[in-house]
Image (cartoon, grey):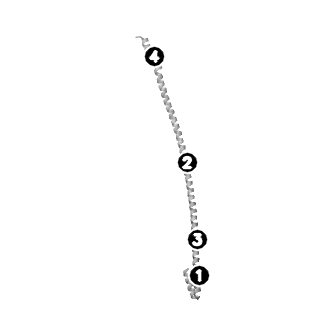
């Protein structure tokens, strides 16, 4: 056995194997590792972007909710104000209508009183005319005069 051939043969074979591996096997493995590393980095970057977008979206949602609450509060305040105005308008209209009805009723009562007074005057004047005609027809003595006045008083 030759020590040189047994030593140099495997060394040359190993060197050829290393060269072949470095030339043809290692570059695709490195490329696959680089591609995988790039995919992982892209995935992490996308995750970070997604997290940032989520944070932005949450901030926007909170701002929108705050604005919506403010608008709702303003709408409620406006509705309450309008309600109070409508109630006050209705009260004013009711007061006005009540005053108008009351004035109309008072006017009607005054007219009825005037009519009653006129009717009473007519009746009194008619009775007075009748009484005076009866007095003139009869002889005037104290007892007849008193009876006639009593009769007129009962008629009135």
Looking at the picture, tell me which residue is in the foreground, 130 or 33. Answer: 130
Residue highlighted by disc 1:
129
Q: Indicate the position of residue 96 as horizontal and vertical percent values.
A: 58, 62
Mark toward the start of the polypeptide (1 vs 2): 2
Q: Indicate the position of residue 129 as horizontal and vertical percent values.
A: 59, 81
Residue highlighted by disc 3:
111
Question: Between tags 1 and 2, which lies in front?
Answer: 1
Residue at 55% from the left image edge and 48% from the top image edge: 71
Crowding near pointer 3: few (<14 within 10 Å), some, many (20+)? few
Quadrant containing the N terminus in the rendered view:
top left
Q: How far is mark 1 from mark 3, CA to CA? A: 26 Å
Q: Do the residues labelled 2 and 4 touch (CB within 8 Å)?
A: no
Residue highlighted by disc 4:
16
Q: Outermost residue, top direction?
A: 2
Q: Is residue 18 left or right of residue 99?
A: left
Mark toward the start of the polypeptide (1 vs 4): 4
Looking at the picture, tell me which residue is in the foreground, 112 or 76. Answer: 112
Residue at 59% from the left image edge and 75% from the top image edge: 118
Q: Is residue 134 above or below residue 35?
A: below
Mark toward the start of the polypeptide (2 vs 4): 4
Crowding near pointer 2: few (<14 within 10 Å), some, many (20+)? few
Question: Between tags 2 and 4, which lies in front?
Answer: 2
SS at circle 4: helix
Looking at the picture, tell me which residue is in the foreground, 23 or 154. Answer: 154
Q: Are marks 1 and 4 in contact (CB under 8 Å)?
A: no
Q: Is residue 98 above or below residue 142?
A: above
Residue at 54% from the left image edge and 46% from the top image edge: 68
Residue at 54% from the left image edge and 41% from the top image edge: 60
Residue highlighted by disc 2:
71
SS at circle 1: helix
Crowding near pointer 4: few (<14 within 10 Å), some, many (20+)? few
């Amino acid at each position: 056995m030759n020590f040189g051939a047994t030593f140099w043969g495997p060394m040359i074979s190993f060197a050829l194997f290393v060269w072949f591996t470095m030339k043809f096997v290692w570059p695709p493995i490195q490329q696959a590792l680089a591609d995988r590393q790039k995919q992982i980095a892209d995935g992490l970057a996308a995750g970070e972007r997604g997290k940032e977008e989520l944070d932005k979206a949450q901030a926007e949602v909170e701002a929108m909710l705050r604005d919506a609450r403010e608008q709702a509060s303003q709408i409620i305040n406006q509705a309450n104000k309008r309600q109070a105005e409508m109630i006050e308008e209705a009260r004013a209209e009711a007061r006005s209508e009540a005053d108008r009805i009351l004035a109309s009723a008072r006017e009607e009562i005054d007219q009825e009183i005037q009519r009653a007074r006129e009717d009473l005057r007519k009746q009194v004047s008619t009775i007075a005319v009748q009484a005076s005609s009866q007095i003139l027809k009869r002889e005037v003595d104290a007892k007849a005069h008193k009876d006639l006045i009593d009769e007129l008083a009962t008629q009135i």
